[in-house]
Structure formats: structure tokens, C-alpha cells
Image (cartoon, rainbow, N blue to C red):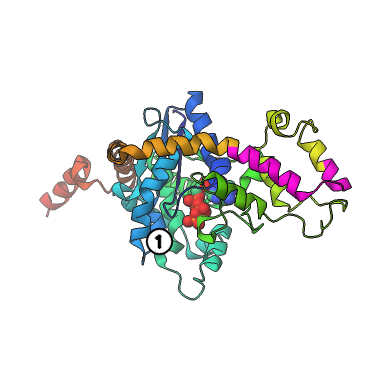
Amino acid sequence: MGKIILTGDRPTGKLHVGHYVGSLRRRVELQNSGEYDKIYIMIADAQALTDNADNPEKVRQNIIEVALDYLACGIDPKKSTILIQSQIPELCELSFYYMNLVTVSRLQRNPTVKSEIQMRNFEASIPVGFFTYPISQAADITAFKATTVPAGEDQMPMVEQTQEIVHKFNSVYGEALVEPKILLPDNQACMRLPGIDGKAKMSKSLGNCIYLSEEPEEIKKKVMSMFTDPDHIRVQDPGKIEGNCVFTYLDAFCQPEHFERYLPDYANLDELKDHYRRGGLGDVKVKKFLNNVLQETLEPIRVRRKELAKDIPAIYEILKKGSEEAEKVAAATLTDVKNAMKINYFDDMALIREQAEKYSKE
Ligand code: ATP
Ligand code: MG
């Protein structure tokens, strides 16, 4: 069995630096490592519609934005297959059969879905599609027989739900599905990058993002307005690192060579943190450093994105080809699933013979 990656994003907006450190940067490294036999990257438009049913235009418009972000970050369509979820009807069929293997109470326990329901004020009226999206995500992952899902921490419950479905399916119907594992970022800051307001998670839906395509002035404005330590009022005051966004972002983005280039008075991030804790280091100085680090990281992505955007039809062509290729793979898995469940009546000669014999005796 080969090593296969499935990962993706909802086209609910342009991608942000949380996506970059949580998953996208890793995907590019894995893609270029040559260690994986297949890499599928899904633009999850059908999942985005589960909480945007009244705004399909938003989803439609953002498909190209997400695709541009992928390619600008270094996803290479020659090495990775980029697909659009809604173009693979087999995924709906798989979800439909998996639904019988999951209970309502199990779905209700999913902590990510719980907090998303709260965030979207869905408490009184949760759309069924939204409530069951972890099942559809299990279909996405298993359709491609994925072994590895590189994602942020919020995806852990989804991968666990998928593992349970795979276990249940294989034990009831026989081994047809592959159990996936999540691949989390190694760095705590990257697991769940906070928004610039210091709130839980940077998220398109919360409007607290720095986007990968952001212009330099806008990046600077956002960095300078970032949440720090509210008790660090004067430069000489001792400051707190925990919960201080600027340091969390430095944890996620900063490399030793950034100090040589932009802040040579310090050898590394630990020295900078120590100084901040002791007092005598102002927020503005740290923010200016972070701005330099982010500008350096995002500039090549922005430049490449603008270049790619000059030929939009070519991007749609990449998505079309990727979706067509992916559909073939999903169709083969669906055949395996239906064979295992014995709902392949017309190919099942033994069944036809058995029924014929039964009736020939009457
Ligand atoms: P939405 O608000 O529409 O749910 P989102 O910003 O949460 O959008 P998703 O498309 O749901 O983005 O997430 C795609 C991938 O990016 C997932 O692997 C997720 O774990 C990762 N990710 C998203 N936000 C962050 C973040 N702030 N930190 C780390 N990883 C993140
Ligand atoms: Mg999300």
C-alpha cells in the first residue's frame, strides 16, 4: 500500500497565514519530498455550502482564489492533484452509506463542530448537512485511500471520526477502506494560529486574518494593530509571552536568519522573549521585526499569485483535469465499497444463480 495524502480547504475566502503554517507549507514540503505516491488537494465547495447554503455565489467566487493561493505557495499540479469536491459525485454516495455507521450522539460530541455551531449561531437550527459534515469528510479521505492528512489541530476530531468509520466498515463488511492518520504541524503555534485580535483561531469566518495575497501596507497595518500583552504598558514593564499574538506569530514564522537580517542585536527568539519578559523591550520594536519576517515570507507568494492570475482559464483547466482524475479514483473506491457491502447485484453472478435456483424449485 502506498503513501497517499488527502487534504483541503473550504472556498469561503482567500487563504490566510493560519492555513499556511497549519497545513499549506507542510503540503508543499511533502509534495517536494517525493515520499508520497499520490497527493490530493481538495477545494471543499460542497462542505462550504453546508453553512453557506444561502450564499452559493461566495463559494463559487472563492474557488479560484483558493486555487491561486495553492499554486502561489508552490503546489505543483504535475505532482499534486487539485480537485473540486462537488465534481466527484461518488463522495455523496460514500457519505450516504457511512451515515449508517455513525450515531447522532457521536456527531454531537465532536468538539470542532460544537464550537463552529456556536460561532455561527446555529444552536436553534443546525442544518443537517452541516451537522453531518464530519461524515462527508470521512468520504473525502477514504475515497482516495489516504494514509495521511496534513492539517491543523481543529481537524483532529474529523480524522478520529474517519478512523471510527473505517474500523466499523471494515469489521462489518470486510477490509475495503484504509485508515488515515493526521499529520499535525510540529510547532505548537502552527497547530491553531490565533487571529490578529488574539481570539481563538484565525478564521476566514471571523475576519481576523492576514491573507496570503495581502498587500505590504495592509500586512504592516495589521501587524501594528495586533493584540499583545494588555499589561505591558510602558517599555520598561515586564511583558507576558503567553497569549501574546506577536510572539505566537514569531514562533510560527521566524527563522534564525531573520535575526541576522532584521534584528542582529539578538541571536534568536529565546533571547528576544527573555528581554521582553524582563522588561525594557517595546511592542513596536517586536512588531516591526515580525512585519519584516512576514513581508519576506509573503512577498514571493504575492508576486507569483499575480503572475498566475494573468491566465485564469488555465487555472480552471488544472482544476478540471484534477477533478476528472480524482473522480476515477473515487469511483474505484466506491466499487470496492459496494462490493464489500454486496450491493453490486448485477455483477454478483452467485446471487443471480442462487435466486434463479430458488425459483426453479417452486
Ligand atoms: P472557515 O472559517 O470557513 O471554516 P477556516 O479559516 O477555518 O475557514 P478551513 O478551510 O476550515 O479554514 O481550514 C482548512 C485547513 O487549514 C485545515 O487543515 C485547518 O486545520 C487549517 N487551518 C485553518 N485555520 C487555521 C489556523 N488558524 N491555524 C492553523 N491551521 C488552520
Ligand atoms: Mg474551518
Q: Amino acid at mark 1?
A: Thr
Spot occupied by residue 339 in the image (x, y as percentages of width and height): 30, 42
Q: Find the magenta span and give its range.
A: 274-295
Q: Rate crowding at label 1 as few (under 14), some (14 to 19) or many (20 or more) other CA atoms within 10 Å.
A: some
Which residue is rendered at x = 14% and y = 48% of the image? 356
Quarter of the picture holding the N terminus: top left
Which residue is rendered at x = 77% and y = 56% of the image? 229
Q: Is residue 87 left or right of residue 218?
A: left
Q: Which residue is mark 1?
A: 50
Which residue is rendered at x = 40% and y = 61% of the image? 50
Q: Is residue 38 left or right of residue 216?
A: left
Query: Is residue 188 something one can see in this rendering?
Result: no
Spot occupied by residue 41 in the image (x, y as percentages of width and height): 42, 40
Q: Is residue 289 left or right of residue 325?
A: right
Figure label count? 1
Q: Nearer the viewer, residue 71 or 134?
A: 71
Spot occupied by residue 149 in the image (x, y as percentages of width and height): 50, 40
Q: Is residue 338 above or below residue 261?
A: below
Quarter of the picture holding the C terminus: bottom left
Q: Is 277 one of the magenta-colored residues? A: yes
Which residue is rendered at x = 45% and y = 70% of the image? 126
